[in-house]
Structure formats: C-alpha cells, structure tokens
Amino acid sequence: MSFKINKTVSDSFLQELESSLNKTAVQPSRVDNSLFHQINNIMNSGVKSKFNSVSEVVEDMKVRSGLTAYLSKLSEKDKEEKELNKISTASDDNFIECLNKIKDTISNVITSTKGGLPVHAILDKIKSIHFEDCDSNFWEDARLVDYVAKANLQEKSKYPTSLNNKNIGKVMPINESNQWDNDYFYGINA
C-alpha cells in the first residue's frame, strides 16, 4: 500500500505554515518598525531622571523613608549622652568621695539595727549625722539608695526570722535575766 501525496495540497500547507511563522516571529526593525518603536518608547519614555547618579537616588530614598531624620536624632542623642557622661563622671567622683566618708556610719547603723530599719529611716539618720559632709545632690542620688538597700538586705539576711514563730509581737515579761535589756537605769538602782 502506497500513499500518494497530492503535491498541491502539501505546497499550500507549507505556504500557510511559513506565513503563520512569519507573522508571529520577531522581525528586524527594518521589516517590522512598529514593534521596535513600541519597545523603544517603553524603555525610553522621554522622562529623564531627576538624579544624576545612583548615590543621589539612594540619598533621596533615605530622606523619603525617614532614615536620615532617624540617624540625625540618634547622633543628637549620642551627643547628649556624651555630655551627660562628662557630667556624670565628675558627679561619680563626688559620689564616691562622699560615700567613702559615710560608709562606716552606714555600716554601723545597719549593723546595730540588724537590718531592721527601713531604707528611708537609715538615710534620714545618716543624713542627720553627715548633712554638711556632702552636697544636697548626693542625698537624692538613686545610687545611694541602692547601696543602702543592698547593705541593709545583706545584714537582714544574717538574722532570719521564722514566719511560724508564735512569739512574734508578744511582750516578754520582765524578769531578772532580761532586766538589763529593758531598763536602762537598772544598773544604777541595783
């Protein structure tokens, strides 16, 4: 069995295929000028950039995004912190000097009360003793409060109290053994 192909049919088919391929294929600009102009117009739409370099575009983006303002605020904050550090360095020296003057008194007050006084009462007592030894800023410094609070807690931890102690708050009857503790004039009168 042999097939005979009609030559006219095959030629017309090939011609149709060739013409359809020519229509969809990209042609050089001299053949299909309209496609070339469309692409060229899209790429070079006639709008010139207002920036001359990439660095100018980056700087514009930084300004529009707020990065430049944020960085300037950070640099101002750094300057302020450096100024405060200069001031605080001088105040640190004064603080340490005053603290060294009154350290023994703080220790004596806390030890004698076994850490039982509140921090503000300790500070008031020390301030009444050493008021003129240090300037007024020293007495209001938070570092002093922290130092006294830590020392007070450390002393208080040496004397643990039991919450189950049923004698808390009871008045002990005065007898001969604890008479010295309760009556200051007992020794004179005895």
Image: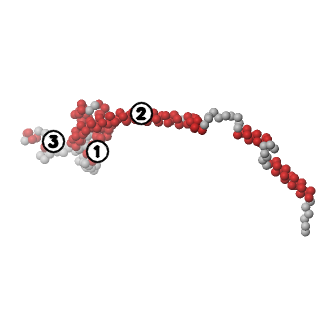
Residue at (31, 32) in percent of width and height: 137
Amino acid carrying label 1: it is Leu
Q: Position of residue 66 (x, y in %)?
A: 54, 35
Reading the image, the residue beneath label 1 is: 153
Q: Is residue 184 left or right of residue 64?
A: left
* Foreground tag (1 vs 3): 1
In terms of depth relative to the viewer, which is nearer, 37 or 72? Answer: 37
C-alpha span from label 2 to label 3? 58 Å
Is the residue marked by circle 1 packed among few (<14), some (14-19), or many (20+) residues within 10 Å? some
Secondary-structure class at tag 3: helix
Task: Give the foreground label among 1 and 2.
Answer: 2
Front residue of 48 and 107: 48
In the rendered image, the quadrant that contains the N terminus is bottom right
- The residue at which mark 2 appears reads as 80
The residue type indicated by label 2 comes to Glu
Q: Is residue 56 left or right of residue 146?
A: right
Q: Which residue is mark 3?
A: 182
Q: Are marks 1 and 2 in contact (CB under 8 Å)?
A: no
The nearer-to-camera label among 2 and 3 is 2
Q: CA distance from mark 1 to mark 3?
A: 27 Å
Q: Using the rendered image of the protein, determine whether residue 18 is visible from the camera's viewpoint.
A: yes
Mark positioned earlier in the residue sequence (1 or 2)? 2
Per the rendering, the mark at residue 34 is none
Mark 3 is surrounded, within 10 Å at the Cα level, by few (under 14), some (14 to 19) or many (20 or more) other residues, namely few
The kind of residue on which mark 3 rests is: Asn
The residue at 42%/33% (across/down) is 80
> x, y percentage for residue 108?
21, 41
Q: Quadrant of the C terminus?
A: top left
